Amino acid sequence: MKKRYSKYITPISIIANLVIINAAIFFVSDRDYSNILFLMYVNSFWLIISYYTEFYKIFRHTKIIRVIAQTITQFFLFFLAYFAFFGIFKEGLIVNNQLKVFLFIFTGITSFKLLYFYFLKLYRKGGLNFRNVVIVGLDPTSKKITEMFSAKNDLGYRFKGFFTDKKNKSANYLGSIKDSYSYILDNEIDEIYCTLSLLDKKQIKELQEFANVNDLKVNLIPDSKEIYNKNFSLEYYDTVPVLKIKELPFEKFETRVIKRIFDIMFSIFILIFVLSWLTPLLSFFIKLESKGPIFFKQQRKGLDGQNFICYKFRSMRVNKLSDKAHTEKNDKRITKVGAFIRKTSIDELPQFFNVIKGEMSVVGPRPHMNIQSLRFEKEIDNYLIRNAVKPGITGLAQTRGYRGEIKKKSDIENRVRLDIFYIENWSFLLDIKIILQTIFNAFKTDEKAY
């Protein structure tokens, strides 16, 4: 019996969530709203939104930060849909209990989701709901996956070994690629991971056909260096298949609207609840240690290469090299207060004013000094693609460790690679994940944060 399908996990989650939603409406809401119209509206929108946010797509390898990001995304959109009902059907009238109902739904579903997530990990850690896996072809990328299988038993993977045509003395070596077919059938293997860099098209096709016949799952492991490429969509002209380049997320009007609404709401929250008290406090210490303005202002390139004034809390003594020389490790220009706010990224917070003005976004490619941008435009392939979106206070490259001083060409190449990946694969969920990871990184020691 195959063990790779957890067919009851998603239905249980959906049913439990709908029970919580309807219980909240029935027991907490005003009686006027315990009617079929309101119930159909709320339940339908919950399911529609969860489909587009992939709220129920939780896999074995899913991290808790993704679960939290999914939850925030789901409830941000559900909040808008929930209270839109009163604007549509009640001319803007909101009954007093509705906020309480929403909070009850949020608390109940979030608690259930997190508890269910950890219960499944414990369930798999106990040896249940497991999958037997093998790897066909082994390179550095697939080797990292084998290490993950071995180190994290709560994922429920039982790594049996790998096949490769190159002789190997490893204890996990099971034989050549041809040997894999009989081994897979004899040992009840559930999933096959194929390393694309070591297999030709014929071998991949044969493995896929073998998997289809024997009801197995095949996963393809690409070369990790090939992280960005425009995806293609398959369309049929009558019966003729045609590959079309997919429309990028930022080419869609709705993407720009959703991102702008979130930027404004999140920035207002930071301005009111963080910068309102942090600015006067930091102003005192910045002025106490060195002469000069509270805010550091510098021209940066933004959307479509247009210049704008980027704001920061001043972290250096006033100097003539601020627009020419990038910060270096143990830079003597940095003050003691400046070292702290740079290490925790607090110096970037005034850029929420740039977000309100529409010059920046909360998440996007980080803007570089103009003198650097001019050089990178000439030296780095695809660098100008970054200008297709607004620069961000934080970005994917920063959360992956590519921040601070650029010592070698590969540093900027990796930033550009990840920036383009972000542009081509944007989602609201990805933005939330990047924000959460940025907050998490602020509390960690980062050797590049100087």
Image (cartoon, grey):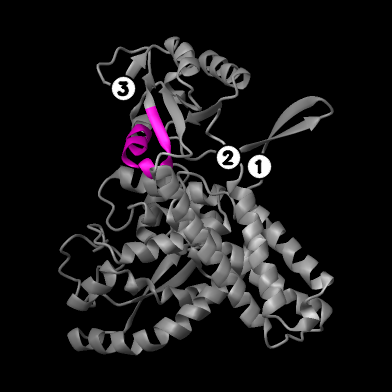
Give the prevailing secondary structure in the magenta stretch. helix
Residue 273: % across, % down? 44, 84
- The region drawn magenta spans 145-159
Residue type at tag 3: Asn
Secondary structure under tag 3 reads loop
Residue type at tag 1: Lys
Mark whose residue sits in front, 3 or 1? 3
The answer to whether residue 168 shows anywhere in this view is yes
Above or below — where is 40 with respect to 9? Answer: below
Q: Mark 3 packing: few (<14 Cα in 10 Å), some, or many (20+)?
A: some
Name the residue beneath numbered marker 1.
246
Residue 361: % across, % down? 51, 66
Secondary structure under tag 2 reads loop
Name the residue beneath numbered marker 3.
172
Secondary structure under tag 1 reads loop
Count the marks: how many?
A: 3
